[in-house]
Image: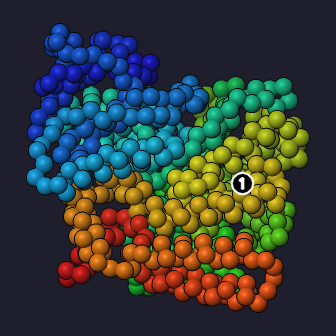
Amino acid sequence: MTSQMTSLNLWESSDFLWLEAAQNKSLPVMSISRGLNPQIKLGAQTATIPGSAVKRSIQGILGILQFPLTTFLVAINQKRKVGEIEGQVVYRLESVEFIPISTISPQSSAEIDAQKRCQSLVENALSTPSYYFTYQGGDLTNTKQRQSLTLPDSGDSDWKKADKRFLWNYHMGSSLLNLANSGDRSKVAPFLVLLIHGAVYIHRCSINGKSFLWALVSRRSRFQTGTRFFARGSDRNGNVANFCETEQIVEYEGQVASYVQTRGSMPFLWAQIPCIKYMPMPKVYGTEQENKTVLAAHFHEQVAFYGEQVIINLVNSVTNKKKKYEGQLEDKFRKLIIDLNQNDVHYEAFDFHKECSKMRYDRLVLLKDQLAKYSFGYFHKIGSAVGSNQKGVFRTNCMDCLDRTNVVQSYMNKEVLADILSKLGLLRSNSIAELEQNEAFLQTYRNSWADHGNLISIQYAGTGALKTDFTRTGVRTHWGLLQDGWNSAIRYVKNNFKDGQRTDGIKFLIGELSTNDLVEVESLKRKKVANSEQSPIIYLPYILLAVVILMALNLLTASGLNWRMFGLSGVYIFLVYLFFQLLVHNSTEFVDYPSSVLLSRQRNRQN
């Protein structure tokens, strides 16, 4: 069936949409009625499609989205092949199309604005790199080990067997399935693709004259999702921000091996809301018992999915005076794990900034020695026969679960890869030294991990990852430090002034933000604009910019070092500091907050 559903014929009339598999006309044709109460029906005959219907080709269906005024079928317009894993073709989503099913007349200008904003939010969310999918018969949502535990003849559709944590079109797809009666939903499901968000790299490589496939697949969770400062810690169900499952896959002569690591925010209730400052102060909220419950729920699920857990916490320790606020979170995490007192959950702290300061990344060997007592193996099968399973995972985190985390995960992954390649007969020993002698493969490995880190970082923080010079080359460089400075500056701007919109797009896409919410927010924004027109606060950024320009002109036009130049510079520096503090004090007027924050504040005022 895989080859039968790789593209669809879409037929349109004013009253119906029809969808049929382009390569096999014997499969059922799906019709969707256009109107206020659309329904799905399945028919075996293409003759049900009238000759007046207009035909065109689409590459797949993600599902249905409800905007304030229009219900859309979300179709895949363009795709790009990334590679094949065990014969299943993996595609990257390139573009989508919104095909209207039903439309209602607007009742207010706020609804019209919300309609436009919805489409903009979804387009931006789906253009954030990168989404990947497979057609019926393939599954990117599950690891190779989880797939081996599912009976192939169970009769369940791929949609039903998918890991819903990583199925990013779950809301859209479920909305489509709900249009069909319960008996037809299993027949409608094959029309849907399984969409993940993350990073996929598939390479055909060679070591010692032997060709094999090496792949890196990262899946981001759709729970507790959002952008960097607006998605921190855990929700009350134990789902953590920026949770990502990374699987390394090797295929060679009928054998498949895979190894999994996870990353995710510290699993208790904490927040770090933007306030114009470069680094907002994190705050732990909730009672002690609530945080214990949240942490227990998180690790109950993690152990159920992955087995034994080793937490690698890379944030600064409480004794690190440079970033003491991180240490307070580390101390909280440590105490909660001690209180949890669970034999299959272990805690290992490693103050990355302290141990690897001054670009001494060779000191990561200290972490390797610290973790030497843990060994979980990896998944391995020959044909369909499973030889071994992975019995646990390393769960790595820093503050963002991006930069430090990616460095450590790529570093640790290499040793397991040497074991896998040795087991498959591609290396003579399981020595990392022998692996590193294969320069061509090592370059592929490093670049893939660095590019993977950049993608995960763009999706969460808005810029590429920091410290990728080490991941890419094995050496920390001064040029890499300059790149990190630039990315940090861009992050600052996006996290404070752009991420509310990005978060709204993500939340709306996955069904956590409703059309009613967006209409309400549009009304609130109109009132705010009307009120702010009389407030001098709105001119603060322009005043600050003017002072900065005057200070620059003073320095550029000065005839030399003199007391007048120093005096004026001191006045300008004081004014910059003063107006910046006023900006921070009035940050709620300037930070781009997501709709969930704005609605929460409005409802708190009403109460």
Q: Position of residue 13 (x, y in %)?
A: 17, 21
Q: Tell me if residue 511 comes above or below residue 522 in the rendering.
A: above
Who is closer to the viewer here, 418 or 72? 72
Quadrant in the rendering for residue 529:
bottom left
Label 1's element?
A: helix
Tag 1: residue type? Thr
Q: Tell me if residue 566 comes above or below residue 384 in the rendering.
A: below
Who is closer to the viewer here, 349 or 561? 561
Point out the image quarter for the C terminus: bottom left
Q: Residue at 68% of width from left, 47% of height from top?
A: 449
Q: Residue at 48% of width from left, 58% of height from top?
A: 304
Q: Residue at 89% of width from left, 47% of height from top?
A: 433
Residue 38 shows up from this direction = yes
Give the colour scheme shown: rainbow
Determine which residue is flagged by label 1. Answer: 468
Q: Position of residue 528 (x, y in %)?
A: 27, 71
Q: Position of residue 49 (x, y in %)?
A: 18, 14
User: Neighbour class for label 1 at 10 Å: few (<14), some, many (≥20)?
Assistant: many
